[in-house]
Amino acid sequence: MKRKSRPIKTNKKALFLGIILATVIIGGSATAFLSMGQNNSNRSTSNNQTSELIRLIAQPVIQNVTALGSDTAKITLVEFGDYQCHYCAQFHRDVRHEILDKYVNTGQIKFIFKDFVINDKPFDKASTLAARASYCAAEQGKYWNYHDEVYNNSKGENTEWINKSSLEGFAKIVHVPDLEKFSNCLDSQRYNDVILQNDELARSLGLKSTPTFILVQDGKQPLGIVGAQPFTVFQQAISQLENG
């Protein structure tokens, strides 16, 4: 679980809700959970803030990036991740397929990914570059295929495996129809604002590491999971929302 060394800067216009850390014991191990509740100094507006926060978290990033799962699912699971993040790749490899099989493909929850580019370095901004590539693939209907291909080829954080050449190679592997259009999109940087908005949302929530997952359901407080936790942790969190 990667932590950013520099202080987190938040957008003054962003919504702020208190984040309360709790510890849940599962199978004899301590697991970090988040419960996002009302700010004690601002109780009078907390309900409106919570509703708006849930809307922002649960809405798809752009039109061409739809959520995985049924539109009628009551629970949305949102992953805030970085394409260079080792633990995000671990979640993708070890746990995500179980969540898709048991909950997403059965219509119980929707799954959304949002960028939290904590591994960017000034000299290459590789995390932003990979995120931009995913949206360029989305223009041609290949977002989730491309998302999966990047994580399937993960080689860790800041090891220079993400560059224009490798990203174009991933596009070819997943059969993005027009590779020239993809390449021009990658050069255009037109999705940088989308990535920045996702990143600012994560920081305004007080998130500090990737992956962090937030489960939302109308009328209930959001619940979060920090790190690449085992499948049983996600099971308990989903059950808590369903039965709480």
Image (cartoon, helix red, strand yellow):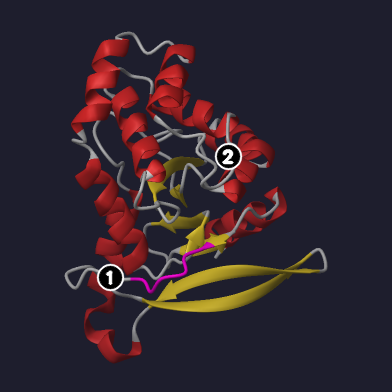
Residue where numbered disc 1 is placed? 10
Please say if 34 is above or below 79: below
Q: Which of 10 and 45 is in front in this view?
A: 10
Residue span colored magenta? 3-8
* Disc 2/disc 1 C-alpha distance (Å): 33 Å
Magenta region's main secondary structure? loop
Q: Which one is nearer the viewer's eye here, 51 or 36?
A: 36
Q: Position of residue 111 (x, y in %)?
A: 46, 41
Q: Does the magenta stretch include residue 118?
A: no
Neighbourhood count class around disc 1 (C-alpha, 10 Å): few under 14, some 14–19, many 20 upward: some
Q: Earlier in the sequence, mark 2 or mark 1?
A: 1
Mark 2 closeness class: few <14, some 14–19, many ≥20 residues within 10 Å = some
Residue type (three-letter) at the residue carrying disc 2: Tyr
> Circle 2 — which element?
helix
Q: 166 or 195: nearer the eye? A: 166
Residue 97 position in % (x across, y down): 63, 34
Residue 103's disc is: 2
Q: Element at badge 1? A: loop
Is residue 184 toward the left or the right of residue 224 in the image?
Answer: left
The picture quadrant where one finds residue 132 is top left
Give the foreground label among 2 and 1: 1
Residue type at mark 1?
Thr
- Residue with the most extreme front position: 123
